[in-house]
């Protein structure tokens, strides 16, 4: 069997020659969208180079957005319009592009003013000033954990301060949870469409991924159990309240079934609640049903702001020391200055004012999105940041995302959320929260509606 083999007659390091050859082959059509690249060892043997050279070349091509690596499956030619979540840039309001690709909190004056008040109050906090430059415990200062615990409890997520570990936000929490629960080569399961950050962390840690079926009620627990019988996994990552990207919510019946399954098969549950919702909009948290085997991830990124990089994890006692070790190895401790700023924001009451204003703004933007996209299959959820748009038959997500980008609107095709080698549905995630203001959202939605309503003619129509 022959494999694609590039010509390495150019100049420069071999890995760059291979990366350039990959790009040239994609542009010429020699490598088609979705095509799997040769295994690295086989290509290295064919070219007479080391496997490390090919690995570096594939990484270079992935950084350029030409290919995508899927854990346990291989490296594939990326579809145009897919978004690399490791290369995030935020240009909201500073360019001609309306970027609806990232789930950012909506701009709010009350957020800016609350941050300014918290910042200006810090010099008068003698305790904070005395401890800000000192080393602190890896799980964070006790008084900071107490503030977080009391706030979470008031928000309907009751926890005790000694259950919490302060971290550097949601992504850091995912890394710490996976590092503490799993070893290299073990399996982590998640919905077949899931948060790209989870996919990236699993790849870095050398974990195998198991994609799980899900529908309008969330994870299909019967299918999950059957998959576990074929591919046993040690941990399961789940977003039970507002699944990213599909917006679905795990039903109460399935929550109970999932907990029964996890206990019967000794599976850790990693519950991601970073997408905050008020208590009335949530179901029973998994950590309340199975506290002994659930890690709860809580972050302020979607509440107060992602730039502060602060959050907490509710961790079962048996895992506490392991997670502390991960935090110590990665950053030694959460920075007390930043966490102190966040806690000041919380205790002042300004954080609650942000959440109330954000709820109202998101409700209006959600209404605007449905109104602007009549006749299009759009799924949203109250309090959410984004819409999941299922395209009409015959339209491809990547091509539609590319057409939108050419018109100055950035969205994310489903390919970015696929776990492993799962086929991508023809759908887009549109983050209505990210528009710099409502007027820009209206303009972007009009472009989206027109683009979907008027697809380009298919080849059979032009013969």
Image (cartoon, grey):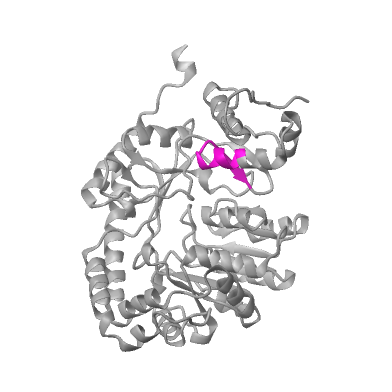
196 vs 193, nearest the viewer? 196
120 vs 201, nearest the viewer? 120
Q: Residue placed at 39% from the left, 53% from the top?
A: 386
Q: Residue furthest top?
A: 463
Q: Is residue 69 magenta?
A: yes
User: Quadrant of the rendered structure where residue 119 is?
Assistant: bottom left
Q: Is residue 339 magenta?
A: no
For residue 22, above or below residue 384: above
8 vs 29, nearest the viewer? 8
Residue 50 visible from this viewpoint: yes
Q: Quadrant of the N terminus?
A: top right
Q: Residue placed at 38% from the left, 71% from the top?
A: 278
Q: Which residues are magenta?
A: 57-70
- Measured as percent of width and height from the top left, residue 105 is found at 34, 60
- Measured as percent of width and height from the top left, residue 434 is found at 33, 53
User: Quadrant of the rendered structure where residue 302 is?
Assistant: bottom left
For residue 122, above or below residue 430: below
Q: Residue placed at 53% from the left, 86% from the top?
A: 162
- Measured as percent of width and height from the top left, residue 150 is found at 41, 84
Residue 216 visible from this viewpoint: no
């Amino acid at each position: 069997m022959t494999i694609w083999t590039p010509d390495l007659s150019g100049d420069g390091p071999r890995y760059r020659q291979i990366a350039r050859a990959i790009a040239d082959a994609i542009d010429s059509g020699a490598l088609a969208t979705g095509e799997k690249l040769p295994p690295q060892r086989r290509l290295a043997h064919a070219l007479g180079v080391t496997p490390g050279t090919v690995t570096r070349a594939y990484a270079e091509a992935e950084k350029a957005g030409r290919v995508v690596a899927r854990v346990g499956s291989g490296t594939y030619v990326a579809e145009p319009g897919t978004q690399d979540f490791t290369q995030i840039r935020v240009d909201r309001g500073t360019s001609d592009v309306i970027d609806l690709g990232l789930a950012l909190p909506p701009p709010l004056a009350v957020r800016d003013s609350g941050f300014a008040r918290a910042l200006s109050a810090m010099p008068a906090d003698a305790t904070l000033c005395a401890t800000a430059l000192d080393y602190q415990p890896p799980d964070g200062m006790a008084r900071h954990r107490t503030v977080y615990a009391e706030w979470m409890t008031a928000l309907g997520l009751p926890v005790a301060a000694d259950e919490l570990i302060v971290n550097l936000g949601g992504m850091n929490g995912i890394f710490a949870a996976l590092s503490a629960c799993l070893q290299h080569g073990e399996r982590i399961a998640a919905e077949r469409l899931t948060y790209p950050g989870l996919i990236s962390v699993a790849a870095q840690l050398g974990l195998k991924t198991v994609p799980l079926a899900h529908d309008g009620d969330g994870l299909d627990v019967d299918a999950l159990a059957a998959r576990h019988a074929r591919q046993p996994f040690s941990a399961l990552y789940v977003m039970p309240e507002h699944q990213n990207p599909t917006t679905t919510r795990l039903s109460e019946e399935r929550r109970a079934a999932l907990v029964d399954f996890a206990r019967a098969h000794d599976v850790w549950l990693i519950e991601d609640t970073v997408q905050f919702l008020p208590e009335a909009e949530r179901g029973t948290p998994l950590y309340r049903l199975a506290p002994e085997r659930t890690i709860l991830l809580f972050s302020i990124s979607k509440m107060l702001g992602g730039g502060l990089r602060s959050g907490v994890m509710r961790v079962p006692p048996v895992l506490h020391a392991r997670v502390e070790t991960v935090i110590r190895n990665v950053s030694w401790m959460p920075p007390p200055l930043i966490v102190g700023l966040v806690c000041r924001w919380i205790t002042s009451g300004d954080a609650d004012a942000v959440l109330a204003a954000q709820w109202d703004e998101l409700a209006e933007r959600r209404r605007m999105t449905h109104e602007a996209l009549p006749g299009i299959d759009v799924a949203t959820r109250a309090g959410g940041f984004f819409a999941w748009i299922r395209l009409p038959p015959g339209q491809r997500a990547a091509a539609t995302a590319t057409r939108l980008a050419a018109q100055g609107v950035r969205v994310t095709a489903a390919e970015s959320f696929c776990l492993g080698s799962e086929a991508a549905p023809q759908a887009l995630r549109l983050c209505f929260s990210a528009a710099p203001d409502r007027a820009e959202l209206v303009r972007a939605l009009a472009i989206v509606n027109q683009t979907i309503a008027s697809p380009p003619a298919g080849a059979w129509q032009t013969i």
